[in-house]
Amino acid sequence: MFRSCRVLVMVAVMALATVEPMACRSAGDADMAKSKTAGVPSASLSMKPRAKVGAYYFDGWAGHRQVDGNPAWAKNAPSHLTQVLVEKFPEREPVWGWRDDSQEIMERQIDLAADGGISFFSFCWYWNEQGDERAIRENPTHTSLELFLKARNNQRMEFCLMVANHQGAELLTEEAWRKAADLWIPYLKHPRAVKVGGKPLLIIYWPHKGNKAGFDYLQAAARKAGLPGVTIAACDGGPPEMGYACATHYNFALGWNKGLEVRKYQDLADSIKERCWVMGTVQQPYMPLVSAGWDNRPWVGPENMGQPPCWYYAEGRTPERLAGFLQDAIKWMDEHPHETTAERIVMIYAWNEFGEGGYLAPTRGDPEGKFLKAVRSAILPEGSGQ
């Protein structure tokens, strides 16, 4: 997300003691890294996964970062790359390099994610507060969404939008919601759009800033476009009478603005199970959140993305613990079938939040894609030979 947005988003969410959630290598290096990730097996069509897993996709890895003096690390840097991320956290660099704004890289990500058991990407989508449709279309954080739609292999996955409705990209009026709805309809009609209850899924961040009249307009526009309606999901919950059919989270982590203090990854998992999964009801089913991590140190400070120092959950973050976390989410859905979606959707934070330490994508520190293999191992039936 944009630097100016993420700070304010985090502050607001942590009023509830939670957080949100928000130079390339050579072609030879990328080819070598690609060979290291080729061992992730393809899922068999005969296997029915225990859950339908979606991963949030934040495209801070397109566009261009403007840095005074244009130092070496910042040359050709995407919008959310920082010097700290490059120099102190090089293990987080994706195997294809820091930039993701090419068709080839998107198609590679689709194959990696699908082979790892990810059913869909939920792309962060941003309104322009001036209602400038051209600025929305040209927003670099929408680059990967458009590349996904053009991908030759996108039949392997589905997608939805996660509307980042917060300051800097907030929909402030009914008119804004109506204009945004018109922009969303082509995505909702796309044959690869995720469906919940037979309707395309749309996730709203900061749901308390929703607009009932705007949602009513969206539903009418969807029906006019030949859709049965839209399933609107609220991050952190929202009133059903507003139009929210289900709930989920983008991310959740205790310790916002509490200073840099290392915590256990298991503490992060336990807090999400205890504080988030309890939101599910028959009236408003919950899509359980599973977090791949939280460690925002590369984005702390005004010279970076402006985030404050927080607790970070780096101790014991392993593929095995991620698999256990996801297995617990599946068990929760087994035990609460009427409090989750019939599609058994689990949302993972995130595919590529490298600045905040929540990511599944193969990196220099995980070139063999062990975290993706962990996802696959958790959702495919025992004895499937993964």
Image (cartoon, helix red, strand yellow):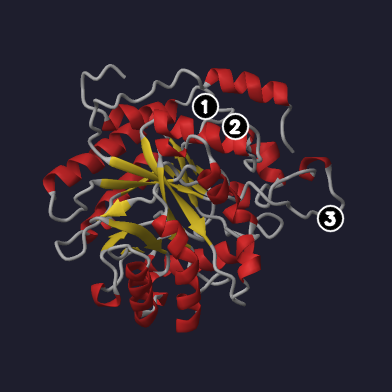
Judging by the rendered image, the residue that carries numbered circle 1 is: 366
In the displayed structure, 302 sits above or below 173; it is above
The 10 Å Cα crowd at callout 2, few under 14, some 14 to 19, many 20 or more, is: some
Could you tell me which secondary element the residue under label 3 belongs to? loop
Identify the mark at residue 384; answer none if there is no mark: none
Could you tell me which secondary element the residue under label 2 belongs to? helix
CB under 8 Å between callouts 2 and 1? yes
- Observer able to see residue 357: no
The 10 Å Cα crowd at callout 1, few under 14, some 14 to 19, many 20 or more, is: many
Q: Position of residue 158 (x, y in %)?
A: 39, 44
- Observer able to see residue 308: yes
Judging by the rendered image, the residue that carries numbered circle 2 is: 91
Taking the image as shown, residue 229 lies to the left or right of residue 129, namely: left
Q: Amino acid at mark 1?
A: Asp
Screen quadrant of the C terminus: top left
Q: Position of residue 151 (x, y in %)?
A: 53, 39
Looking at the image, tell me whether mark 2 or mark 3 is earlier in sequence order: 3
Looking at the image, tell me whether mark 2 or mark 1 is earlier in sequence order: 2
Q: Residue furthest right?
A: 69
Q: CA distance from mark 2 to mark 3?
A: 25 Å
Which image quadrant for residue 14? Answer: bottom left
CB under 8 Å between callouts 3 and 1? no
Taking the image as shown, residue 97 lies to the left or right of residue 163, namely: right
In the displayed structure, 263 sits above or below 278; it is above
Could you tell me which secondary element the residue under label 1 belongs to? loop
Q: CA distance from mark 2 to mark 1?
A: 8 Å
Q: Amino acid at mark 2?
A: Glu
